[in-house]
Image (cartoon, helix red, strand yellow):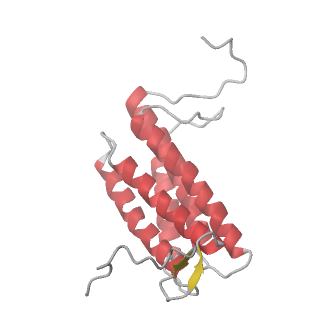
Amino acid sequence: MGNRLSKIVTRTGDDGTTGLADGTRVPKDSARIEACGSVDELNSAIGVLLASAGLPSAMATQLLNIQHDLFDLGGELAIPGSVMIREPQVEALEALVESWNAGLPALREFVLPGGGVAAANCHLARSICRRAERRCWALARSESLGPHSLRYLNRLSDLLFVLARVLARQANGSEVMWRRERGAPP
């Protein structure tokens, strides 16, 4: 394989456009680029999560695989009409959600983001995933996307929520729950 990026400064984006992988130039604030950027930001947030201390090795391996999937999704977004996210990837996320959630107690209240560094990083990745999903839905309103991409992001945000719960319990023995009735702040 040849060099993918031999020259970093090209000045081709100085006019407010950027190139898709198929060579098409589009505005940097187009719905497609917003979706690409949000998926890229999500992948970076998962990288930060992976840099957190104390992740179970199985979880770290699964998150690394998800990063590869997100690169596929980014490629799908960068090449209009391509399909790189497939049904087995969505099914794999569903299985992971069920597996990690099996040991958690049922929720009676909302969980506040936090619960340790790794859990907080996971909650941040989850919220970025939700934004990426919204950006991809905005794109899907005007252009076609692969049939599994939106479901993949939806399942991934579910998984990140469950993983954040697992990580908070690992760090603190419990999660920080939202309380409707609380006294004055300290």
At x 48%, y 42%, the residue is 164
Viewer-nearest residue: 59 or 9? 9
Q: Quadrant of residue 146?
A: bottom right
Q: How many marks?
A: 0
Q: Position of residue 89 (x, y in %)?
A: 48, 71
Is there any visible trace of residue 137 in the rendered image? yes
Q: Position of residue 61 (x, y in %)?
A: 32, 57
Is there any visible trace of residue 154 in the rendered image? no
When the figure is inspected, residue 57 is found, relative to residue 114, above or below; the finding is below
Q: Position of residue 94 (x, y in %)?
A: 52, 61
Left or right, 96 with respect to 54, comes to: right
Viewer-nearest residue: 165 or 64? 64
At x 44%, y 52%, the residue is 45
Quadrant of the rendering where the C terminus is positioned: top right
When the figure is inspected, residue 154 is found, relative to residue 181, above or below; the finding is below
Left or right, 111 with respect to 100, comes to: right
Quadrant of the rendering where the N terminus is positioned: bottom left
Q: Position of residue 176 (x, y in %)?
A: 54, 28
Viewer-nearest residue: 148 or 75? 75
At x 45%, y 48%, the residue is 100
When the figure is inspected, residue 28 is found, relative to residue 160, above or below; the finding is below
Viewer-nearest residue: 180 or 21? 21
